[in-house]
Image (tube, rainbow, N blue to C red):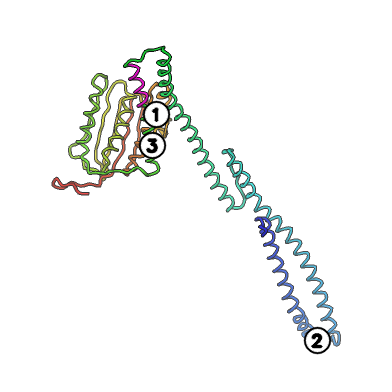
């Protein structure tokens, strides 16, 4: 069975409508016009005009003229309709053909192709939808390339170090010692941490990361966490503070995930604060508990703030450092907080410091020492 394209279908449908209309006009005219003509002749005879035996002959002449006129009208009307139908069909199909060409170019990697504005509202709406989709896909493709480049860089650095040391040991250039083994172990852990972070982020973004929520006393939880990190700052010019009220409400959280969020925020603060203070603060507000990690470090430039939660994004300063992080930690924090029903924000000023704060919904009450969901 032959499949007709849209232009041919539009052409024949418009032509068919025209033919049906012309035919109906002709049939109805042939049936009623002679009768109306005869009635008018009789009306003229009633007014004194003598037609006599010419009545039948006039009617025959009128019918012949009417038929010939209808034939020419049908031929000329159909021809005009065919030309008009072809022009209209071409006008409608042309932007669709243009869209097909652009889609083909887009599929072949020309992601900058866009549809122009169209005169037909419905097709113009389709073109705008395509342009929005194209812009989104172009951004996704750009992000994909950035992620591959960053991931390649992050994997290459520790692998190069490990391979270089092993080759030097194998060639007898250096002698393996505890310091070299410690460096190899550190680079191996760095690779493992990167892979684990990627897996966690992937699971979180597709919604496959389950949460083991439990009623949690945040003050006690924060106190233990701060004590753990304080030991790491004993020989540095940094101090870790805790600002948390004793009457902070219980919240339903996954304690391991909350610790992971805060560890990432602490690590980020330590990395950018050579001296000064890092403060973990918590407070309640209506039906939410707010948690913030504030540092007195180098800060973030205003133009960089919208990008800090993007995967693999790092500031130029971090990229210039030997161990500037993987750029995944803050992305994981944002997703884990969103899974808890919260949202994270950042405020920063260059040379002054940064504050990362987020809220968690309160859905646990404590009455007379009994926790209630």
Q: Earlier in the sequence, mark 1 or mark 3?
A: 3
- According to the image, label 2 marks what residue? 45
Q: Is residue 300 above or below residue 98?
A: above
Q: Residue at x 22, y 44 (%)?
A: 215
User: Circle 3 — which element?
Assistant: helix
Q: CA distance from mark 1 to mark 3?
A: 13 Å
Q: Residue at x 82, y 74 (%)?
A: 65
Q: Is residue 357 left or right of residue 166?
A: left
Mark 1 surroundings within 10 Å by alpha-carbon count, few (fewer than 14), some (14 through 19), many (20 or more): many
- According to the image, label 1 marks what residue? 326
Quadrant of the rendered structure where residue 22 is?
Answer: bottom right
> What residue range appears in magenta?
179-189
Q: Is residue 48 above or below residue 359?
A: below
Q: Residue at x 23, y 24 (%)?
A: 231
The front one of 61 and 133 is: 133
- According to the image, label 3 marks what residue? 199
Q: Is residue 332 left or right of residue 52?
A: left
Q: Is residue 362 left or right of residue 167?
A: left
Please state, as top left, top right, bottom left or bottom right, where the N terminus lies in the image. bottom right
Q: Position of residue 232 (x, y in %)?
A: 25, 24
The front one of 360 and 31 is: 360
- Is there CB contact under 8 Å for labels 1 and 3? no
């Amino acid at each position: 069975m032959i499949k007709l394209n849209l232009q041919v279908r539009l052409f024949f449908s418009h032509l068919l409508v025209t033919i049906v209309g012309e035919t109906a006009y002709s049939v109805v005219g042939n049936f009623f016009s002679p009768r109306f003509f005869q009635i008018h002749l009789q009306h003229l005879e009633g007014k004194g005009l003598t037609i006599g035996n010419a009545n039948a002959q006039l009617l025959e002449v009128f019918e012949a003229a009417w038929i010939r006129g209808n034939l020419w009208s049908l031929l000329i009307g159909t021809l005009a309709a065919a030309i008009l139908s072809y022009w209209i069909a071409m006008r409608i199909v042309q932007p669709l053909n243009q869209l097909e060409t652009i889609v083909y170019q887009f599929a072949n990697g020309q992601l900058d192709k866009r549809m122009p504005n169209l005169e037909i509202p419905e097709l113009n709406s389709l073109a705008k939808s395509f342009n929005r989709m194209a812009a989104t896909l172009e951004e996704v493709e750009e992000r994909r390339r950035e992620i591959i480049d960053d991931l390649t860089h992050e994997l290459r650095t520790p692998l190069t170090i490990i391979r270089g040391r092993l080759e030097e040991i194998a060639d007898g250039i250096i002698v393996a010692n505890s310091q070299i083994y410690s460096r190899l172990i550190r680079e191996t852990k760095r690779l493992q941490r990167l892979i684990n972070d990627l897996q966690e982020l992937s699971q979180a973004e597709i919604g496959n990361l389950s949460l083991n929520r439990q009623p949690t006393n945040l003050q006690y939880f924060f106190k233990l966490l701060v004590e753990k990190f304080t030991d790491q700052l004993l020989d540095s010019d940094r101090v870790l503070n805790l600002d948390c009220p004793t009457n902070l409400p219980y919240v339903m959280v996954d304690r391991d995930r909350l610790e992971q969020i805060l560890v990432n925020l602490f690590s980020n603060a330590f990395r950018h604060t050579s001296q000064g203070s890092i403060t973990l603060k918590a407070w309640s507000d209506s039906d939410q508990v707010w948690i913030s990690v504030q540092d007195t470090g180098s800060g973030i430039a205003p133009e960089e703030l919208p990008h800090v939660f993007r995967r693999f994004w790092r500031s130029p300063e971090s990229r210039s450092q030997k161990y500037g992080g993987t750029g995944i930690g803050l992305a994981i924090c944002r997703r884990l907080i969103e899974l808890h029903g919260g949202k994270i924000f950042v405020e920063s000023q260059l040379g002054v410091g940064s504050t990362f704060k987020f809220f968690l919904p309160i859905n646990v009450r404590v009455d007379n020492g009994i926790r209630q969901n």
